[in-house]
Amino acid sequence: MASREAVQRIRAVTDLPFTVRSNTFSISFLGKQVVCCRVHWLPVVVSDNAVGSLSESYGTVLKVERELVDGRGNGVRKVFLEVDVAQKIGIPHMFEFSDRLRALVTLTGRAPLCLKCGEVGHIRFGCPSSARVAGGPGQAFSRPAPREAQEVVAPTAAQTFSAPVKDPP
């Protein structure tokens, strides 16, 4: 067993990132990994501290940053968490801040959440519940057939506009 002092020294070293040949590294305890959760649909007025405190129950919050587009917030926050495998599996697809404010949580490499049926493994565009229109339930999603070409009708004299054409000089 390691002494408490030794563990504190190890934690002090692992908290500091280091750079080698323009690559930044950090050391984590065995079995831990750092994941970047993207939290979508947040109003700009929601503070980073509120997002971080909600994320604390899923792992150790290392950093929360706003995603910016043209220097302005776009409602997406990146939350960097240090988690073990069990904690990573437990990160929900939706955060609920209140009964009226929900936020979608995405992780790289995790199966997506369908916003139509609420099932994990596909997105709304490929939802099997939409397949009823395309070919019956349980069948793979397919796009509807393109519209038939419409008959081209020549315009009448009242619908045309003509201007006198000048001869080039």
Image (cartoon, grey):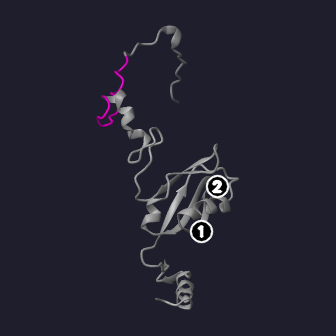
Residue kind at label 2, given as amino acid type = Gly
Q: Nearest the camera: 92 or 40?
A: 92
In the image, taking residue 67 as reference, residue 29 lies left or right, namely: left
Neighbourhood count class around disc 1 (C-alpha, 10 Å): few under 14, some 14–19, many 20 upward: some
Q: Nearer the viewer, residue 99 or 35?
A: 99
Counting residues from the start of the chain, the first of labels 1 and 2 encountered is: 1
- Count of numbered circles on the image: 2
The secondary element bearing badge 1 is classed as strand
The amino acid type of the residue labelled 1 equals Lys
Q: Residue at x 34, y 21 (%)?
A: 148
Q: In this figure, which residue is indicated by the disc labeled 2?
A: 73
Q: Which residues are magenta?
A: 136-150
Q: Residue furthest right?
A: 45
Disc 2 on helix, strand or loop? strand
Q: Is residue 3 magenta?
A: no
Tell whether label 2 touches label 1 (CB within 8 Å). Answer: no
Magenta-drawn stretch contains 149: yes
Against 112, residue 161 (above or below) is above
Q: Nearer the viewer, mark 1 or mark 2?
A: 1
Name the residue tied to disc 1: 63
Residue furthest left as drawn: 139
Disc 2 crowd rating (10 Å Cα; few below 14, some 14-19, many 20+) is some
Residue furthest top as drawn: 157
Q: Measure the alpha-carbon separation of dots 1 and 2.
A: 17 Å
Residue 143, how many percent across, how many down?
34, 33
What residue is shown at x 46% (from left), y 38% (from top)? Answer: 116
Query: Residue 38: image x %, image y %?
Result: 53, 57
Q: Is residue 70 left or right of residue 126?
A: right
Question: Mainly helix, strand or loop, the magenta region?
Answer: loop
